[in-house]
Image: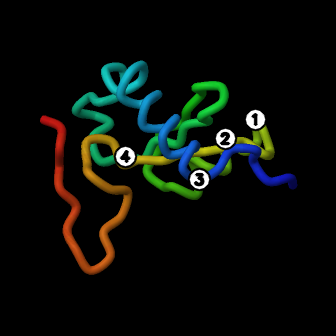
Amino acid sequence: MSKPKLSDEEITQRGRELYENSIRLRVETPDNIGKIISINVETGEYEIGDDLLVTSLKMRTKQANAALWSERIGFNAVYAVGGTLFRIAE
């Protein structure tokens, strides 16, 4: 498997922009709050599920070397280690 051609910073920037500008309004629903979204930052395709590994693997079956960015829908982070997740969506 080859390494994505984008830097980590570019993946993060594109992922946030895609989420905020074209995906957020479609996916931030009561049923999806707290779920994980993995986004291919080059195509805009995404998968939503309960597990980061599962959503990432589903995206990798479509494109093995996809540059992926993930987020917990409606929260400030995917996981909290030694801290607390804060809900940012209603």
Q: How many angstroms separate mark 4 from mark 1 (CA)?
A: 21 Å
| Disc 2 target residue | 59
Q: How many angstroms separate mark 3 from mark 4 (CA)?
A: 23 Å
Where residue 10 sits: x, y (%)? 57, 43
Mark linked to residue 35:
4
* Number of residues whose C-alpha sits closer than 10 Å to that of mark 1, classed few (under 14), some (14–19) or many (20 or more): few
Label 4 vs 1, first from the N-terminus = 4
In depth, the one of 11 and 54 nearer the eye is 11
| Disc 3 target residue | 8
Label 3 vs 1, first from the N-terminus = 3
Q: Nearer the viewer, mark 3 or mark 1?
A: 3
Where residue 2 sits: x, y (%)? 86, 52
**Relative height, residue 6 to residue 85 (above, below):** above
Tell me what residue is drawn at x 48 percent, y 55 percent. Answer: 51
Tell me what residue is drawn at x 87 percent, y 55 percent. Answer: 1
In depth, the one of 6 and 67 nearer the eye is 6
Label 3 vs 4, first from the N-terminus = 3
Label 4 secondary element: loop
| Disc 1 target residue | 62
* Number of residues whose C-alpha sits closer than 10 Å to that of mark 2, classed few (under 14), some (14–19) or many (20 or more): many
Label 3 secondary element: helix
Q: How many angstroms separate mark 2 from mark 3 (CA)?
A: 18 Å
Q: Amino acid at mark 1?
A: Lys
Label 2 with label 3: CB-CB less than 8 Å: no
In depth, the one of 58 and 74 nearer the eye is 74
- Which residue is farthest right? 1
Label 1 with label 2: CB-CB less than 8 Å: yes
